[in-house]
Amino acid sequence: MKLRILFLRLISLVTYIFLWAPVIVIIVFSFSANKYGIKWDGFTWKWYAALLENDMVRETCLRSLVIALITVVVSTFLGTITAYGLYKLKFKGKQLLRTSILLPIVMPEVVTGAALLLFFIKLSPLQLGYTTIIIAHIVFSTPLAVFVILGRMQRIDWSWEEASMDLGATRLSTFRRVIGPLLMPGIAGAAALIFPWSFDDFVITYFVSGIGNTTLPIYVFSQLRHGSTPVINVIGTLFTVITLIGLLATKMAEKRSRTARL
Amino acid sequence: MTRSNNQAPYAVELINITKRFGKITAVNDISFAIPQGEIFALLGPSGCGKTTLLRMIAGFEKQNSGDIRIQGEVVNNIPPNKRECNLVFQQMALFPHMSVAANVAFGLVERKRPRPEIKQKVQEMLDVVNLVGMEERFPHQLSGGQKQRVALARSLALNPKVLLLDEPLAALDRKLRKEMQGELRRIQREVGITFLYVTHDQKVALSLSDRMGVMRDGKIMQIGTPLEIYETPQTRFVAGFIGSCNIFSGRVLSKNGNGMRFEDQYGHSLCVPDCKLTDKDLVRGISVHPEMIEILPPHLAGSAEKSDNLLRGKITDVFYQGDFTELTIKIPETDCRVTVHLSRSKDCRVPLKQGGEVVLRWDACHSNILRD
């Protein structure tokens, strides 16, 4: 019995080491003075200073942020109205359509990327660039939004909608005052999932970005091709810390709202 | 706060309303009218079309044919948000993200009333439903009865021409239901708004309403005061649904001075009060309430009066219910079974045990005539 518990603990420990080791290595080496960033040569802040002076990092990071923000806004908006239609309307082939929403999620990114590239080159007047990157991101993010928001809709009591209309609200007003606020946790959840997806997408972006247009993940990759640089470790460290803070903040907000509800 | 615009005598009029869902006719050519200020109960088993009827009046379903009038005005093509009637939902449907005050104010905000007026109206309504001091609570912090009161206040705040209630008490426990029934009556008297109350619970319908209609299979079977419906049901269905009556099929043999001679399907001769309005050929059966039947020991049967109905039988079941005892009595040589409710205060001179021989007695005037 005791042995079994010990064994379980060991397995958990190994799993966590496995998960956390790369992250810890990056964080540690971001402070190492070694110029290849793979050996401990004493503590330094100089890579952080170098990052501030690196225009490319700032520029690509900003671009990735803008792309992710636009993607989040557009795809949650599209996702919400699509989910509403799929949930509320009655039409032929609805079940098929609802299932096929999952298709872009399970499709290998290489396939989606290649298909989009062909589409943009052969069938659309668009030049490869930021517009095509944003369109591509919306294409793979919207199904996820639909999926998450549909899940939330299943938990809504639709007599709320009828009650609202009965009390004199129009359809639009009902959505704004009743259904929208009740869907908010789903919409926020979709946004929280889509933002990192879009921000660090590499494969699809690589296909449709064209020449000379870089997002942060592509820039990081191009830097690593010429051998590791400590600046990459700094970027990794910063994003780990930011993500952790965000995660803790949402957890705390969730806990607070739950205690307030009860 | 009684309503002043009483130009139309009826709050709601239904004229030849029919509603079909595919091949099923949910509501079949129904016509009736509800006078101003009345509590009207629509009673029927589940699936009889009563909720469909209510949803058509509210505007959530559209009838295939017929007219709906609210205070004289035809509303067939008016969407639910423009109809001046409000529906209290069975599940109450309070908005979970809004406080009690915001829930009650919802319709007034939608009508863009000025703030002070909304505030005043909300207070007034919470006062009517006895919820003053609960303004800032959220629905999940309220008990079932309190939620019910909020739902009522929310609908009444709009001063509807008729308030539609879809079994709003069904979700409450028995004691609370009784309390809320009294509250509903008080509130209705206070605001003077017409109530149309849909339910499958005959007790609620009988005790709450001024008048009631009994529905079956999309048709209205009978409309009347609770007393009329309970004491003089016209059909087997109403008799059975409302009071678990004993029903005897048969026909009238002869008419004489103080009543009619009725023979049931087993050949028992029974006495029925003379109903001047009915042709005797229209009588197809009689119903007798279980609480109107008396039990006598067999040797006392001879002392009965002429107008009495007597039947010999054997007790087959005894169910003790507390305030009364339910007996099932089989009439020998037939498969006819009679249910008798023996109230505790009634003196019974027969030992109540299985197999005991008894004589059933009831006064002729307690036989009610059925027409189907």
Image (cartoon, grey):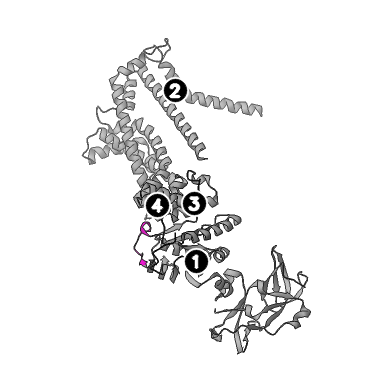
Give the crowd class for mark 2: few <14, some 14-19, many >=20 residues within 10 Å. Answer: some
The amino acid beneath tag 4 is Gly
Q: Is residue B76 magenta?
A: yes
Mark 4 element type: helix
Residue denoted by label 3? B127
Q: Is residue B31 left or right of residue B246?
A: left
Name the chain letter of the residue that bears numbered label 2: A
Cα distance between the residues tagged 4 and 3:
18 Å
Residue denoted by label 1? B48
Name the chain letter of the residue that bears numbered label 3: B
| Residue A106 rendering spot, x and y as whole percentages | 40, 40
| Residue B247 rendering spot, x and y as whole percentages | 62, 76
Q: Is residue B1 left or right of residue A74?
A: right
**Residue A180, quarter of the rendered image:** top left
**Earlier along the polypeptide chain: callout 4 or callout 1?**
1
Badge 1 and badge 3 both on one subunit = yes
The amino acid beneath tag 2 is Val
Quarter of the image that includes the N terminus of chain A: top right
**Earlier along the polypeptide chain: callout 1 or callout 3?**
1
| Residue B157 rendering spot, x and y as whole percentages | 43, 54
Between label 1 and label 2, give the one nearer the viewer. 1
Residue denoted by label 2? A23
Viewer can see residue A155: no
Between label 1 and label 3, give the one nearer the viewer. 3
